[in-house]
Image (cartoon, grey):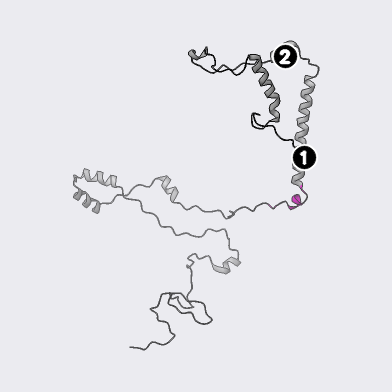
Amino acid sequence: MSQAAVGVPYDAFDNPLLMKTELGKPAKRGFTLPDYNFTYGRPNLAKDGGAAEAMSGWSPTASLPTLRKEKRPDRDFVALNKACIGSGLVTAKEQFEYRATHDVRRRVAEEEKNKTKIKRIPASMTFGISTRPSTPVFDLLEHRYQDRWLNERRKNELAKRDRLVQKQNLNKGIYETRASLLRKYCPPVESPPLWQMPKFQKQQPHLETFRSTQARQKAFESHATDCTARTGVFGHGTYESAKS
């Protein structure tokens, strides 16, 4: 059994939490990397001639060859079942054995063939988002938007004033007559009284605090003239004090 050296990490310690950082070096991860001669990336299978052909007039728009595997069509189980019945095979076991020894594929339609074709992107196509137009700094510094808004408001006011003057000129010289006034007059419509049972319509009040109807009207008129100096919503309170 070999004795473990002090400060040398074991290969079995792949846990990054157990790895100790070395002085002056970044922390290591818990997995091993290949040596310095290893080249990362995917190999380029296309042979375009290299730099020599590019310098001698290589066309950048030439399409590179693509390796595409043709997709095999799916099995046609409808045709297989039909062939099984035609051969006299009815049970599930016989049909399973027939499918194992026979193979029928579906016919690929023209539309599906067109879908499988690889679409080539034109060389002149530009990717990305269009650049936003620059901010009109000079218009902001010169208050151009404010002037434009004021001009629009002034135009609207002038147009409104012209329409009003034109309307007044149309009505100028036209006098109201009795017939035109009666045509515009709307007679007031009294609201119908609240519904009341017939047996209560002819009943008189049991309590009358006023001596007569004239006294009642005079009391309400005096209250209407005096309620402005009293407190309360309906002017039934005490007199308000003078306000300076």
Which residue is depicted at the point 77% across and 48% down?
Answer: 143
Q: Residue 237's image quarter?
A: top right
Q: Are marks 2 and 1 in contact (CB under 8 Å)?
A: no
The boundaries of the magenta stretch are 133-143
Q: Residue 228's image quarter?
A: top right
Quick one: 46 or 25, which is closer to the camera? 25
Mark 2 or 1, closer to the camera: 2
241 left or right of 65 in image = right
Residue 213: give its label.
Answer: none
The amino acid sitting under disc 1 is: Asn
10 left or right of 105 in image = right
Q: Position of residue 236 (x, y in %)?
A: 64, 29
Element at label 2 = helix
Residue 91 vertical placement versus 186 (above, below): below
Quarter of the image where the C terminus is located:
top right
Q: Is residue 139 magenta?
A: yes
Q: Is residue 5 magenta?
A: no
- Label 2, residues with CA under 10 Å away: few <14, some 14-19, many ≥20: few
On the image, numbered disc 1 is attached to which residue? 151
Which residue is depicted at the point 29% across and 47% down?
Answer: 77
Element at label 1 = helix
Q: Position of residue 124 (x, y in %)?
A: 59, 54
On the image, numbered disc 2 is attached to which residue? 181
197 left or right of 130 in image = left
